[in-house]
Image (spheres, rainbow, N blue to C red):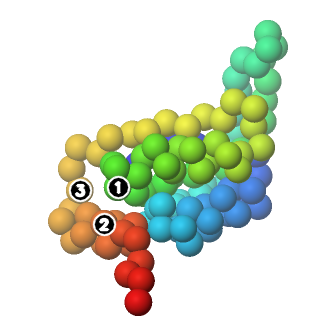
Amino acid sequence: MLYTTFPSLVEAEKAGQALVEDRLAACVNILPGMISHYRWRGAVERAEEAVMLIKTRASLAEPVRAAVKASHPYETPAILVLPIESVDDTYFAWIMDSTKPPVEV
């Protein structure tokens, strides 16, 4: 699972939809309305953001990170890869199925 934030719900939804359409993620959860306080270039800043949780397979963590970074409006986006200790077998199977490349005919 990967964690990131976006400056708006619109930008998060656009990025999240692309990740799912490209089969890089089985699911993204977008949580709007987060307030962030952080230090940036010597000043303490405040921003409203949307959190995105990206559910994918471990082998896709780097391609997902690269895709998020390539489309992200922030100069230094927060992109954290969070290892999962345990997952329900049927949910895991769904993630794996949803993120496998489509079969070409």
Depicted 33 relative to depicted 41: above or below: below
Query: In this figure, which residue is indicated by the disc labeled 1?
Result: 57
Numbered badge on residue 91: none
Instruction: Give residue 87's mark.
Output: 3
Would you place residue 33 above or below residue 43 in this image? below
The answer for how far apart the CA atoms under marks 2 and 3 are is 12 Å
Query: Tag 1's secondary structure?
Result: loop
Q: How many neighbours does mark 2 have within 10 angstroms: few (below 14), some (14-19), or many (20 or more)?
A: some
Q: Quadrant of residue 57?
A: bottom left
Residue at screen point 75% across, 37% down? 74
Image quarter of residue 41:
top right
Q: Which mark is residue 96?
A: 2
Q: Secondary structure at mark 2?
A: helix
Q: Quadrant of the C terminus?
A: bottom left
Q: State whether residue 6 is above or below residue 24.
A: above
> Is any atom of residue 88 visible in this view?
yes
Identify the residue shown where x is 40% and y is 71%: 101
